[in-house]
């Protein structure tokens, strides 16, 4: 029997890479997306595949899927701060109402459920690096709270369904990820810097650029999510790279690798922008036997090659 996986947010950046991966693993992939921030061009190469089905649907509404489901990967949500500041209510709804609908479906179908959670559950962290046992430092009424609290609620709901209804659940806490198929206009640091560098335009570093992030290449991320979905581990698992760098350094890396003549300009730091972020990945190493393998120069080359081949 061919296994069937539902991927919500399947036309998004991570969702579309997951569609590719689970098709390659022999699954029938049911991809659901309302195309609010996802894009059909991320999945258009899959429409000829008989094991691929697309549903243009908002997961905050009632979901009906005919037949069996073995696995649900819940990746529907805006994920760029610019996007979720523009559509705060949809962001809250997909994390709360959407997660509720999809968990109900998992319960009904007796499917395993994997939540795409986020490093944002740690907020502006007071513990560094962030281990899964840290409860975080989130401003619930701040502008970023719409995403952070929706994902924190989603985690709470997943654990409640796990404990109360015995739904077989997994939680991936996803840290900054980059690679092909990010929308170059989504406002996040990586696609923005890349777009600016390729056009030899000024690179807009927010604040002093001393704030740090740890950027993981998408292939490493997808491998870890796949392994988590095949594991038996119900507690949250951080997934990301532990190679932390300042945003200013990251901007310089992008300029160097693209051979750009762009200069750096400084703009105001957005509100509640976390000062540091680096996952403690000891749990992922142990549970998933996984380690990120792609460094920034290689990841940048892979991304640039993918952009060249599609333009
Ligand atoms: N950032 C920046 N310039 C930009 C976009 C983002 O300096 O044009 C900074 C942002 O303030 C943050 C970091 O880069 O400190 C990463 O931002 P991103 O939006 O990629 O995601 P976040 O990690 O904040 O969710």
Image: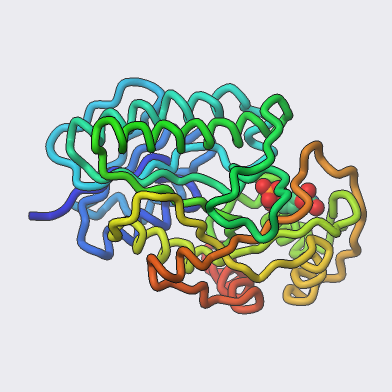
With 290 as the anchor, is 247 left or right in this view? right
Residue 51 appears at what percent x and percent y? Answer: 20, 52
With 67 as the anchor, is 241 left or right in this view? right
Residue situated furthest front in the rendering: 133
Q: Where, by quadrant of the figure, is residue 123 drawn?
A: top right
User: Which of 57/212 is in front?
Assistant: 212
User: Which of 131/140 is in front?
Assistant: 131
Residue 178 appears at what percent x and percent y? Answer: 59, 60
Residue 112 appears at what percent x and percent y? Answer: 25, 45
The image's colouring method is rainbow
In the picture shown, does residue 20 fall above or below 220? above
Q: Name which residue lies at 56% across and 73% down.
A: 302
* Quadrant of the drawing holding the N terminus: bottom left
Residue 121 appears at what percent x and percent y? Answer: 59, 42
In the picture shown, does residue 81 fall above or below 17? above
Q: Name which residue lies at 61% across and 76% down.
A: 295
Q: Name which residue lies at 55% across and 76% down.
A: 294
Residue 59 visible here: yes
User: Which of 234/73 is in front?
Assistant: 234
With 137 as the anchor, is 24 left or right in this view? left
Q: Name which residue lies at 65% across and 74% down.
A: 296
Q: Where, by quadrant of the figure, is residue 129 drawn?
A: bottom right
* Quadrant of the drawing holding the C terminus: bottom right
Residue 188 visible here: no
> How many numbered marks does the figure carry?
0
């Amino acid at each position: 029997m061919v296994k069937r996986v539902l991927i919500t947010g399947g036309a998004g950046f991570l969702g579309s890479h997951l569609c590719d991966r689970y098709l390659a693993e022999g699954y029938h992939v049911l991809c659901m997306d309302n195309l609010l921030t996802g894009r059909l061009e991320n999945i258009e190469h899959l429409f000829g595949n008989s094991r691929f089905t697309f549903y243009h649907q908002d997961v905050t509404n009632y979901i009906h899927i005919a037949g069996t489901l073995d696995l649900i990967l819940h990746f529907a949500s805006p994920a760029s701060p610019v996007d979720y500041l523009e559509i705060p209510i949809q962001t809250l709804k997909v994390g709360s109402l959407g997660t509720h609908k999809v968990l109900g479906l998992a319960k009904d179908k007796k499917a395993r459920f994997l939540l795409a959670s986020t490093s944002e559950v740690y907020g502006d962290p007071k513990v560094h690096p962030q281990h899964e046992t840290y409860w975080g430092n989130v401003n619930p009424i701040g502008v970023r709270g719409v995403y952070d609290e929706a994902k924190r609620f989603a985690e709470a709901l997943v654990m409640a369904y796990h404990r109360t209804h015995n739904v077989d659940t997994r939680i991936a806490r996803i840290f900054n990820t980059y690679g092909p198929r990010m929308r170059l206009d989504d406002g996040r640091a990586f696609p923005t810097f890349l777009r600016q560098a390729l056009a030899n335009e000024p690179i807009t570093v927010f604040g002093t650029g001393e704030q740090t992030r740890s950027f993981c290449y998408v292939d490493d991320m997808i491998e870890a999510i796949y392994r988590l979905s095949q594991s038996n581990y119900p507690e949250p698992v951080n997934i990301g790279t532990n190679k932390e760098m300042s945003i200013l350094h990251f901007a310089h890396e992008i300029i160097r690798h693209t051979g750009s003549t762009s200069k750096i300009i400084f703009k105001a730091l957005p509100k509640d922008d976390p000062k540091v972020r680096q996952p403690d990945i000891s749990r992922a190493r142990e549970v998933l036997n996984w380690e990120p393998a792609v460094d920034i120069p290689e990841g940048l080359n892979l991304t640039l090659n993918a952009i060249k081949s599609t333009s």
